[in-house]
Amino acid sequence: MNEILDWIIHHSPALIVAVPLLGAFLTILIGKIGPRIRNVFVIIITAITSFFVLLLANYVFTNGIKTYVFGGSSTSIESSYAIRILFEIDGLNAFIAIIAAILPIVAIIYSWAFMKEHTGLDKYYTLILLMTAGMLGMILTGDLFNFFVFLEITSIASAALIAFYLHKANSVQAAFKYIVISAIGALFLLFAIALFYGQYNALNMAVIANNISFTFIDKIALVVLIAALAMKAGIVPMHMWLPDAYGRAPASVTVVLIGTTLASLYGLFRVIFTIYGNHLFTVDSSQIALVLGVLIIILAVVTIVIGVFMALKQNDFKRMIAFAAIAEIGYMFLAVGAALSTYTFEGSSATISASGQMALKGGVFHIFNDALDVGLLFLVAGAVYYAAKETSLNKLGGLARNMKYTTIFFLIGLAAVSGLPPMNGFASKLIIYQSTFQINPLLAIVAILCSILLLATFVKVFYSVFLGPKLPKFSGVKEVPKSMLIAMGIIACIIIFIGLFPNVFVENIVTPAANALQNATSYIGGVL
Amino acid sequence: MAFYIPYIAVVALILIGLYAVVFKRNLIKIVIGITFIECGVNLFLITLGYRENSTAPIYTSSPGGIMSLPVPQALTLTSIVIGVAVLALMLSLVVHIYRHYKTLDARKIIGGDEE
Amino acid sequence: MSGMSKIVKTMTGVAFPFVMIYGLYIIVHGHLTPGGGFQGGAVVASACAMILVAFGSVWIMKKIKESQLSILESIGAISFVVFAFLGLITLFDNNGIFFKNVFANSHYIFGQSVSYGSSAANINTAGTLPLMNIAVGLKVIAAIFLIVLVMASATNKIREGEAE
């Protein structure tokens, strides 16, 4: 038994991406047999993938960096040319892979009942499995061109899924907007990768990080990379596709879309901290880290403010939650930017101050919490749509009498997003407020104010949708089926567990991830 | 000077593609603009692999002289395949949009209904 | 859409086998000459699109159903991933790894070794590479033909919708 587990852990980076891929292609054949077998098969494949991810994360958090080379035994040939394609997993990769493994299985359990009366479900499950494989490949890879290929796989599969409601004109238009913006962003990412390849004759992230010297072309590549990856992550002013795409897709698809957005954010952090890490932060003649940190802080503050103020005036349930998601991405960005701007140089190495370390931990912790919170809110919105067939806030009302469990889940999600105790949002937002207050008090004031405005928005929504007198046209509304309740319950349990015991979570899982971000040398040491 | 002509062509293709995406109203012209940008980036990838007086990299040891780099042709091929898939998806979505709105003008479609 | 005139149909029927053989040659010789799975598959798919344009999509949709092409595409993709998994099974080697080339330099199918230096090309080399090329080529043929077929029938439906 132990040998089998060791074999699985040794080969798990390849298995994590290959098993959903194989399952996606097999789903079309198995779908010809019958719908129940296909649903059970898809749930089994996703459960196996999540299990492998948890095994791998456990191994990496205790033993250090794991490298997996495809098609060969060692990472370099001849003398020291590291040419082969490889997956390299350190603390940050494992942390985000855990999120990317929880979200699809919740979405697939939810869509057992949510999607039951739609046709074309073979293609739906195939595309969700393809999105899962692409998302996990994006997170685990150690090669820049491989990252681009998986990014394109994910964006094509998600654009086809956003247009799932073909009878409505809104969804098709949202999918077209998404694919145009996403294709242009990915092509500019490929342009930056070609710039790297032309200079250093290498596509491997560790090799580029080892050889980089901050020439003029590297500065151009940095700007293009930040712009393209921030466009995919939904940072203002490149956020145009996000409200439409999140708001008009089916609710289970939106949950997996959150995972892909976070994977692009991970790519941005990997580029800034690891590829440019060794050179960017040791050149003491130019204050590049400070300038980069200030730029990121400005973008993050604009994102938070615009996200919250646009969420106040929305009339559509899912669109409002999408704007809240934009604001939450701004919080993560703010924490990381504040940490970047506190780099000080002592001798020949650069370190962040103590409050910067705390901000980095808070930002990384908030990635996990935000994915769960916003995912739960979208699942509740989908449940309301399933029961009442209505998404406009003006027309909904008085649903709490018939849908008790859904109301409880919405209360949990509301408390978690706005940062109220005892949910997990409170823990991560408190760390962000404390650390940014020590760096610059104005940032903390903006963050707390916008959090209060977010709470006000969601309380208004709660009152208008769930409380209030019972409307006559909603008198036949029943509680949603069990599979949707189970999916929402899984996320709610994880939220409450992290909220009650945050220090267990922070010590074992978040701290290795935050340390791996600052430690570019060990990332290079995994390959060369 | 003749050495720089491919790079000038790359910049020209990308700029023409960006102009078409930003300023044109017909949806099909926007799709054609994205294809232009993709062609420009592919040309850039291929041009990076050339060395002066080199032969094709298909021997185990070359008959004389140097061989050009074999990696960019694999990268460009992957990029072309991705471009075909994105193009097929975008054109299918344009067909569906036409079936709903009966027009291909971007100003009448985007910003239409906000419910 | 309806087909074209009799001359076009006859000449397409004559030209189709030649283009298909050329495309299959590009697929199978992918490890020796420039080419491979996607390139050869695109050539064969354009021959199939030529047939579609000449004979009309109404006639073609009676002969070939979308679900058959979809199954063919899935078979191509599954065999690609199965060939990649073959490197993991420790029957062949003790230190297996994903995507390992298990047939090269062995005595199974496609297993001869390549001699050093410039020599005549031997198709019996390079292990799982030609097998993966054939799988990818099959998938690309089915996928591109399916895309063109669906778009042609969608144009049909729009034209019928406008005529009503």
Image (cartoon, coloured by chain):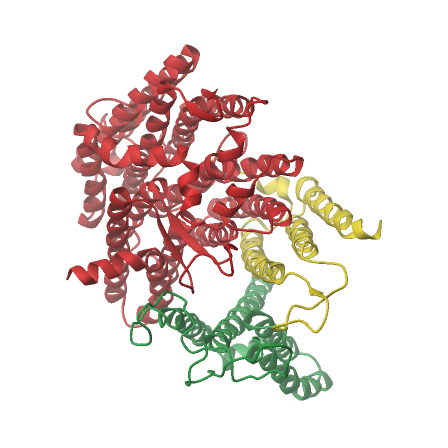
Q: Position of residue A155 (x, y in %)?
A: 48, 50
Residue at 59%, 37% (x, y): give it: A213
In the image, residue C153 sits, relative to residue B95, either above or below, namely below
- Residue C1 or residue A21, whichever sits in front: A21
Which color has been applied to chain A in this rendered view?
A: red
**Can residue A447 be seen in the rendering of this structure?**
yes
User: In which quadrant of the rendered image does the C terminus of chain C lie?
Assistant: bottom right
In the image, residue B41 sits, relative to residue A342, either above or below, namely below
Which color has been applied to chain B in this rendered view?
A: yellow
Count of labels shown?
0
In the image, residue C18 sits, relative to residue B103, either above or below, namely below
Which color has been applied to chain C in this rendered view?
A: green
Instruction: Determine the image quadrant of residue A361.
Output: top left
Image position of C73 (left or right of B84): left
Q: Position of residue A113 (x, y in %)?
A: 25, 52
Q: Position of residue A11 (x, y in %)?
A: 31, 59
Q: Position of residue A333 (x, y in %)?
A: 43, 28
